[in-house]
Image (cartoon, grey):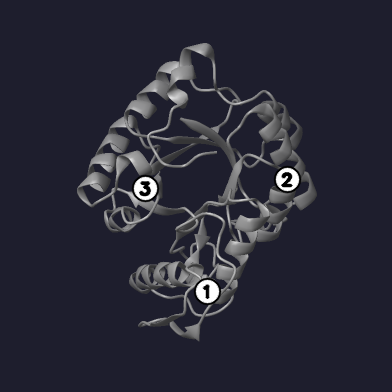
Amino acid sequence: MYFGIYAANAAPFADPQTTAQVAREAEDAGWDGFFLSDNLLFERVVPVAETWITLAAIAARTERIRLGPLVTALPRRHLGRLARETVTLDRLSRGRLVLGVGSGDDRWGEYSTFGPAPSQVQLGAMLDEALAVLQGLWSGQPFSFEGTYYRIGPTQLLPTPVQQPGIPIWVAGRWPHKRPFRRAAAWNGVFPNAIDGELTPGDYRAIRAFLAEHGADPAHFDIVHTQEVVSLAHPADDTLRAYTQAGVTWWLVSFADDTPLAALRDYIRSGPPRSPASEPLQQTQGGMQP
C-alpha cells in the first residue's frame, strides 16, 4: 500500500509556495504522493489556488512523489489546453503525474457561475468523449475526433508524455453508482467516494469484484481510499491490513478545513503510517509506482 496526502486547493493550501514546500516535506518524510483537488469554487468563500500552477511548483520542488489533481472535471476544461498542460507537467515531473478525472457537478456553482450547466447525463457523455480525445492527443500521432460534444480537427501534438502509453488516469465515482466504475475499469485506477459515510473494506471488495468483471486487471490497477484525519493520528495496523486485503492500493490522508497549517505540517513531517507491523502492506496490487 502507498500513502499520500490529499489537500484541497484552498486555505490553508491556498499559497502555492507554501504548498510546494509542504509537498517537499512530505517527500522527505517518506510519503508516496501529494494530490490536490481542482476546484474553482468551494461551499463558502475562501482563498483558492489554481491547481495546475501549484502542481507545477510541487513538481519543481520534489523528485520522487506522485502528484496530480483529484479530480479535474474534464467537461469544464479546454481539451487542447489540458493536453498541453498534462504533457508539460508529466515532463516537468519526469513522469510522476497522475490525472484524476471526473464529470464534476454544480453543487457549488462551478458550472453555472461561469456558463451553462450541463445535465448529469451530458456530463458523463462529455467525460467519455474527453478521455478519448486526451488519449488521441497524447499519442503524438495525427489525430482528429468527431463526437456529440467535441470536434477536434486534424492535428498532431508533440512532445508526448514521459509515461507511455499515456499518463495514468484515475476515474472518480460515487459508490454504489455503477456507471463511473464501468468507465474506470477501462483506465488505470479508481478514486471512489461514498454517497453516505465512509467506504468500508466490504465496499472495496465489491468494487474490486465489479471492476474485474468489467475488464480491469487487478495487477495493473489502483484503488484509492481517502480518509479524513481529524485527530491527526495514524490508523491502526489492523485497519490498514483490512483495506489492503480488500484491494486498496493507495491510502490518502485528507484534513478537516479548520485544522491549523502548523499542525498539518507536524503530522506530515512525522511520516506515513508505516510501523513495523504494517510494513508488509506496502506492496501494492496496482500498477502505480511512486
Label 1 element class: helix
Identify residue type, mark 1. Answer: Leu
Compute the Cα span from label 3 to label 1: 29 Å
- Closer to the N terminus: mark 1 or mark 2? 2
- Nearest to the observer: residue 239 or residue 61: 61
Label 2 element class: helix
Labelled disc at residue 19: 2
- Closer to the N terminus: mark 2 or mark 3? 2
Image position of 156 (left or right of 92): left
Labelled disc at residue 195: 3
At which x and y percent is residue 88? 64, 62
Residue extending furthest top?
277
Quadrant hosting residue 65: top right
Q: Please name the residue shown 69% across and 49% down the image.
A: 59
- Nearest to the observer: residue 47 or residue 182: 182
Labelled disc at residue 274: none
At which x and y percent is residue 137? 49, 72
Categorize mark 2 by other alpha carbons within 10 Å: few (<14), some (14-19), many (20+).
many
At which x and y percent is residue 248? 39, 34
Residue extending furthest left?
213
Q: Provide the residue designation for mark 1.
A: 79
Residue 263 visible in the picture: yes
Identify residue type, mark 2. Answer: Thr
* 143 in relation to 174, above or below: below
Label 3 element class: loop
- Closer to the N terminus: mark 3 or mark 1? 1
